[in-house]
Image (cartoon, rainbow, N blue to C red):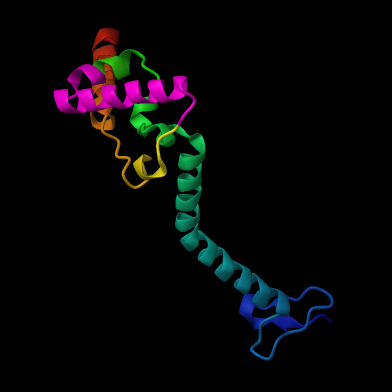
């Protein structure tokens, strides 16, 4: 007869598994350890993902030309409309960054490292306008379907 483990509802232990002094099998203890390790990994996963995002941001290379992430968006109809809604100073800064990046690219140069856009400094300046344009377009399409 196989020993029973009170920690897992009195179920029989697998062959070769011995009950621990606390009444739990070695496998049950191992499962608990794995669950605790998984929780630690999940809680640390945010930091890991943040490090991966930072690495990818630098690996993409657009920051070496002084560009921000929103400067690199493909200009479809929604983005063009959002650009029209940008305040003039943000639009002028964007055009300066794009022209400077084009000039640097043609000269096969990059900015000095002190002038690179850092991950922490890159704020999505176009995103609120773009979300508004997309919301309006979807609303317009819904009205046209009726």
**Does residue 146 sit above or below 34 in this rendering?**
above
In the picture, the quarter occupied by the N terminus is bottom right
Q: Residue at x 34, y 25 (%)?
A: 100
In this rendering, position of residue 88 left or right of residue 79 = left
Q: Position of residue 120 (x, y in %)?
A: 34, 47
Write down the region rendered in magenta: 82-109
**Residue 143 horizontal/vertical position (percent):** 24, 12
Residue 105 in sight in this render: yes
Task: Indicate whether residue 78 is drawn in magenta.
Answer: no
Say if the magenta span includes residue 102: yes
Residue sitting at 46 percent across and 57 percent down? 47
Q: Would residue 66 appear left or right of 84 to someone viewing this image?
A: right
Nearer to me, 29 or 62: 62
Q: Residue at x 29, y 39 (%)?
A: 123
Q: Residue at x 16, y 27 (%)?
A: 89
Most foreground residue, 95 or 120: 95
Above/below status of 31 relative to 93: below
In the foreground, 112 or 131:
112
């Amino acid at each position: 007869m196989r020993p029973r483990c009170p920690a897992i509802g009195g179920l029989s232990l697998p062959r070769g598994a011995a009950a621990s002094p606390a009444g739990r099998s070695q496998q049950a203890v191992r499962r608990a350890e794995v669950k605790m390790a998984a929780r630690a990994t999940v809680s640390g996963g945010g930091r890991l993902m943040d490090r991966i995002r930072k690495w990818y941001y630098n690996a993409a290379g657009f920051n070496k030309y002084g560009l921000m992430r929103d400067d690199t968006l493909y200009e479809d109809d929604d983005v063009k409309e959002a650009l029209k809604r940008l305040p003039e100073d943000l639009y002028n800064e964007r055009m300066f960054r794009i022209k400077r990046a084009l000039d640097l690219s043609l000269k096969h140069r990059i900015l000095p490292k002190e002038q690179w856009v850092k991950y922490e400094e890159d704020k999505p300046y176009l995103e609120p306008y773009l979300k508004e344009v997309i919301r309006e377009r979807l609303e317009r399409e819904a009205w046209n379907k009726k």
